[in-house]
Each structure stands twice: as C-alpha cells, then as structure tokens.
Amino acid sequence: MNLLIVNLHDKNALSEVQTLDWALFDAAGKRQQGNYQVALESFDDMIAGKVGEQMSCLLIVPAQQVLIAQVQVPSKQRRHLQKFLPFLVEEVIAEPIEEMHLVLSHLAADGTAEVLAVNHSNMKFWLDQCAQLNIAPHWLTPATSVITCAPDELVVCLDEKEVLIKSARVSLTSSVSNLPNLIELIAADKDAQAGMSQVRLVSTQAFAEKQATQLSALQSQFESEGKSVVLEISPSLFDYLCEQACHQLLTSAKPSAVNLLTAAYQPTLQRNGLGSWRLLGYVAAVCVGLQLLFNVGIGLYLENKGRAVEQQVVQRYRELFPQDGKIVDVKIQMRNHLQQAHEFDADTDFLQLMSVVGYQIQAMNQPQSLQIQQVRYDERQNSLMLDMDVRQIQQLDQFKQELSEQGLAVTILSATEEQQWVKGRLRIDREA
C-alpha cells in the first residue's frame, strides 16, 4: 500500500497564498516523488494520476491549531471516559466546549489523559481543502503527534521558523525565537523532567548551518543537566516528519499518531473497482439471500437455546430462593432480591464505616476541645461527611492520621477559625 503525506502550512501573514509539502512513498517507505512549498492551486496538476484507490493519505495540519491538554481522570469515570471527556477538559479550554472536537490521545496508568482539542471550524476548513485537492485523507493529525519518542526521551525538532517539542508528558510548538523560554519552562516542570534521561535534537540542515552556536549551546545545556544527547541532521522538518510517519503507518502494527478523523469526521469507505454494476448487483442479491437463510437458521437455534437457558435460570432461582413458592417473572423477582441485597449492603457499609469513625471520636472526645456538629452519609459515594469543632487545627490533622491508620481515606475539605474554635469539615471514604 502506497502512502501520500501532505503537510499543510498556515497562511503567510503577508500573502493570501497557502502552501503545502507533499511526498509519495511506496509500501516499503521509499520516497517516489514530492515537493516543498507548493501552492494549493498547483498541487492537483502535480499529483494528477498518481493517487490510486489502494493508496492511503496522511494529512499533517499545523500543530498551533490543535490544543493538547492533560487532565486527571477519576478512577470511577474511566469506564465511561468518552462521555465525561467534555466535562474534564472544559476548564482548560478557553473556547466553548460545544465548538470543540475532542480526541483522546492516550490514558496513562495513573489516570492522566492526553486530549487533543480542535475547533470544528478548523476541521471543516481542512477537509474542505482536501476536497479541493481531490484527496480523501485516512489520517489527520498535528505535526507533534507524528513524532515518536521513548518514555524517558525528549525530542526537540528545530528549523528556521518553528520548534516542535515532544515527550511522554509534553507536546509543544512555537516560533523558534521562543526556544529559550520553552526549554526553561520544561526544565522547571518537575513532572516533565520525571524519568527523562535522554534528549534527541533534530535540526534541519539550514538551522544547523545558520544557528550553529545556538544549537551547540542547547546541546551543552542538556548535557550539563546529566542527560544523554543525540544530534540528528535532517534536510527539512517535513522530511523528518515523513520518516516518522512511514515508520508508524507502514511498519508499525500499532501507530502512536493520533487520528483526528473520529466520530462525525471518520472517512467513509470509497467504492473500489469490482467490475460492472450488474455483476455487483448479482453478488449483492446472492449475499442477501444467504444472509436471510442464515438468519432463519440462527433464529431457530437461538430460540431452542433460549428455552434451555430459561429452564436453567428457573432451576437456579429455585435453588437460591426456595422460599419463593411461585415464579411469575424470574427477571423481576431476581431484580427485587438484588435490590434488597444492595440496600442491605449500603446500610452495612455505613455501620462499618461509622463504627471505625465513632471509636476514634470516642478516643479523642474532649468536650472542652472537640465537638461534633453534624454527620452525613452519601450512599452513592459511600462517603461520610463530618463537621466538627476543635480548639486547634492540629487536632484535625491528628484525627485524620488516626483514621488513615485504620485504612480510611480522609480529606480535610475546609478549616475555618471562628473566635476560639476551628470549624472543620472532613470527608471520609472506605479505601485509603
């Protein structure tokens, strides 16, 4: 399968002409043709006759137009992450969340999720441009997402105009004039520095020749921080992105590049050459007939299988609940038993939680210095809310420490000084 890679540029502020880079690769990743800084109007003539139905297309869009945000996902929401994703990222996105297209890049084991957000208007603009260019992209991704890096590696790509920075926790792009500030920002970020032991500097040939002093100083700075530095020289930033893309899409079984063509933007399957439409109609009719016969056969089989399963369920129900003499609807009766069991478990959990908390309250109960004002229990969260007055805030910390040693998770939500008392509110959960 051949691969066409198209890299869209932002419009030049001094010109209305938008340009792109393109390159065509064979199934082995060998470049066949390509060009740089091509006007969109000229692309159709260059690529005419070269795009076939068996060719895949990757569109690389300006990374400045794609916001990459990291949010912490609570463990209880990971199962339904796609549903809660807009609520998690709306606090870190300035634009209205309903105007943004969100794509989950990856979810780390510690609950850190990387999310790509792009305005729907930008998505429509890029796809309209693809229609004008007579190409149908299978992948659409920002430049930073194409770059691959090891978990302990920082990749810095430099050319005369822009810089791309990528690590396991950082994805940045900016003008090359902001490079010192970006490096200083990363150096001050402890999370970004955690586990980072090597740096890969990728410089274009032009940058290496014109900014040799700056490149050498940057290499020395990373080495002084104890990091192993590898310097690579590439003819252009687009050539390096193509090398990374070919490695992921042509040789890797699981590409790491994030495809923005999800949900409503998923590419539709294109019709390929299967001969005449009449022959295709005959094949479709035969397939429909076979499907109908299969559906009838599988329906009869599943009906018989369902009866057998129903008998097994009724027999199992009689074993579990022998006190129920009459079985009218086994599904409804089973649901009622499970609901009663759930209510009993909720009451039991409250009593167990309250017994541990009550013991510690009794052990520390000194009316002159500790008073309980209110106790509330949240059945949905299985958590206890406790309002208490103490003389000193250290008593809240002591109370929290005592409960933590009993395997409970205690969070001090507030502590307010009023006259001679400190009014505290604590949340107590089952697991520490």
Image: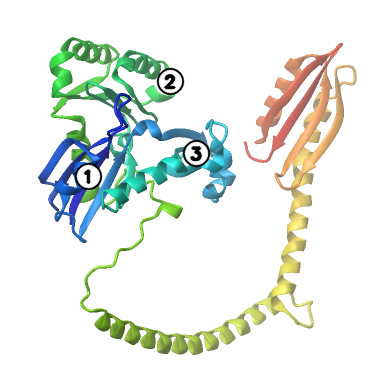
Q: Whole-percent x and y of residue 85?
A: 53, 43
Q: In which quarter of the image is the N terminus?
A: bottom left
Residue ID at (46%, 33%): 69
- The amino acid type found where label 3 is placed reads Gly
Residue 5: image tag: 1
Look at the image and tell me whether residue 74 can be seen.
no
> On screen, 224 above or below 134?
above
Looking at the image, tell me whether mark 3 or mark 1 is earlier in sequence order. Answer: 1
> On screen, 147 above or below 207?
below
Q: Residues within 10 Å of mark 1 (few under 14, many from 20)?
A: many
Residue ID at (86%, 32%): 374
Secondary structure beneath dot 3 equals loop
- The amino acid type found where label 2 is placed reads Lys
Q: Which of the 4 image quadrants contains residue 39?
A: top left
Secondary structure beneath dot 2 equals helix
Residue ID at (14%, 38%): 35
Looking at the image, tell me whether mark 1 or mark 2 is earlier in sequence order. Answer: 1
- The residue nearer to you, when weighing 171 against 386, is 171
Residue identified by numbered label 2: 190
Q: How crowded is mark 3: few (under 14 residues within 10 Å), some or many (20 or more)?
A: some
Residue ID at (56%, 83%): 306
- The amino acid type found where label 1 is placed reads Ile
* Distance in Å between CA atoms under marks 1 and 2: 36 Å
Looking at this view, name the residue that lies furthest to the right. Answer: 367
Residue identified by numbered label 3: 111
Q: Taking 36 as reference, is 18 left or right?
A: right
Q: Whole-percent x and y of residue 428?
A: 71, 35
Q: Taking 230 as reference, is 68 left or right?
A: right
